[in-house]
Image (tube, rainbow, N blue to C red):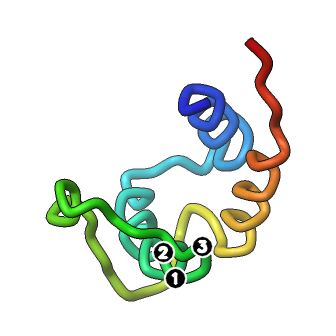
Amino acid sequence: MHLITDVKFYNELIKGRWTKEIYNDYDRINKKLIEKYNIEIPKEVQEYVSFKRGKLHVFTENEIYEFIEEMGKIHLTI
């Protein structure tokens, strides 16, 4: 699932818009995603999760929410 998510994210959602600014966008959206989806960050990785304030540059908040909803509809069969 992780690989499918990466392919769809980079090749569809942000295709042609990728810049290094994406890393700041991840930090800017982290808190909103954690709160919206009630995510608990494991203690072992908490020090690696960053939070920043500011405007998103590579994707919008709505694009991310729609992407998450789309990915949630994918059913994998083994």
Q: Is residue 26 above or below residue 11?
A: below
In which quadrant will I find the N terminus? Answer: top right
Residue drawn at x 62%, y 64% is 59
Q: Is residue 55 above or below residue 75?
A: below
Q: Secondary structure at mark 2?
A: helix
List x then y, in percent, for residue 60. 66, 71
Tell me the SS state at disc 3. Answer: loop
**Please, what is the three-letter code of the amino acid marked with disc 2?**
Ile
Which of the numbered marks, if any, corresponds to residue 35?
1
Query: At 20% across and 63% down in the image, what residue appears?
Result: 43
* Whether label 2 touches label 3, CB < 8 Å: yes
Please tell me in which quadrant of the rendered image residue 62 appears: bottom right
Q: Give left or right: position of 21 versus 16.
A: left
- Circle 3 residues within 10 Å: few <14, some 14–19, many ≥20: few
Q: Position of residue 4 (x, y in %)?
A: 65, 28
Q: CA distance from mark 1 to mark 3?
A: 6 Å
- The three-letter amino acid code for the residue at tag 3 is Tyr
- Gap between marks 1 and 2, in whole Å? 4 Å
- In the displayed structure image, the side of residue 44 where residue 38 appears, left or right: right
> Residue 47 or 15: which is nearer the viewer?
47
C-beta proximity under 8 Å, tags 1 and 2: yes
Seen from the viewer's position, the closer of residues 38 and 70 is 38
Q: Residue at x 84, y 45 (%)?
A: 73
Q: Name the amino acid, label 1.
A: Glu
Which quadrant would the C terminus be assigned to in this image?
Answer: top right
Q: Position of residue 27 (x, y in %)?
A: 36, 70
Marks 2 and 3, how far apart at CA: 6 Å
Depth check: give the residue in front, 72 or 32: 72
Q: Which residue is mark 2?
A: 34
Whether label 1 touches label 3, CB < 8 Å: yes
- Give the residue number, with chain letter if any, for mark 3: 37
* Residue 2 x, y percent position in the rendering: 54, 32
